[in-house]
Amino acid sequence: MQMRYEHAYYRTKDKSLDIEFLMLDLGKPLGWRAYVMSDIDYKRVSAQRSDDYRDTHLYLDNGTHRYIDKTKDWPYVCRVDPIYDLDVIRRVAGAWCEITAYYIKHGGSFRDIQVKLQEEGVL
């Protein structure tokens, strides 16, 4: 089976963050993953901002799969359930970018930021 993929770029609505993604279809049971190919400086506004995977919702394959590069683990956007549709993973990646930009500037939990940005119509 040949893997399907797409390079994608996302600029947040406030233009504070540009992210390059590699959307990769890993088939069943994993589905599409949005790998982040850009470096993100979580501490550029506050040295107190966490860059831990639990706070940023970026996970690693930790050497178990390494779908992109045999020498490096690229982080991917965490999601609860597998996504089997390219359009859906694009929307998830875009929402993650908007939440991440807000998080870098103001802090807070991703869940609370998501609710706030949905109420404001950003997501």
Image: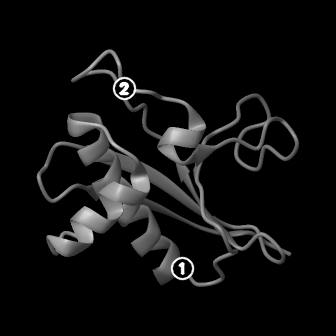
Question: Which residue is more in the foreground, 37 or 49?
Answer: 49
Q: Amino acid at mark 1?
A: Leu
Quadrant that contains the N terminus: bottom right
Q: Which residue is mark 2?
A: 49
Q: Quadrant of residue 104?
A: top left
SS class of the residue under badge 2? loop
Q: Is disc 2 surrounded by few (<14), some (14 to 19) or many (20+) residues within 10 Å?
A: some
Residue pictured at 72% horizontal, 39% vertical: 69
Q: Quadrant of residue 49?
A: top left
Can residue 9 be seen in this snapshot? Answer: no
The colour scheme is one colour
- Residues at marks 2 and 1, CA–CA distance in whole angstroms: 31 Å
Question: Which residue is more in the foreground, 47 or 85?
Answer: 47
Tell me, yes or no, whether the two marked residues, 2 and 1, touch with CB atoms within 8 Å. no
Residue 109 picture location, percent across and down = 40, 47
Determine which of the numbered discs, if any, sits on residue 86 in the image: 1
Q: Amino acid at mark 2?
A: Arg
Q: Is residue 30 above or below residue 45?
A: below
**Left or right of 40, for residue 75:** right
Q: Is residue 26 above or below residue 18?
A: below
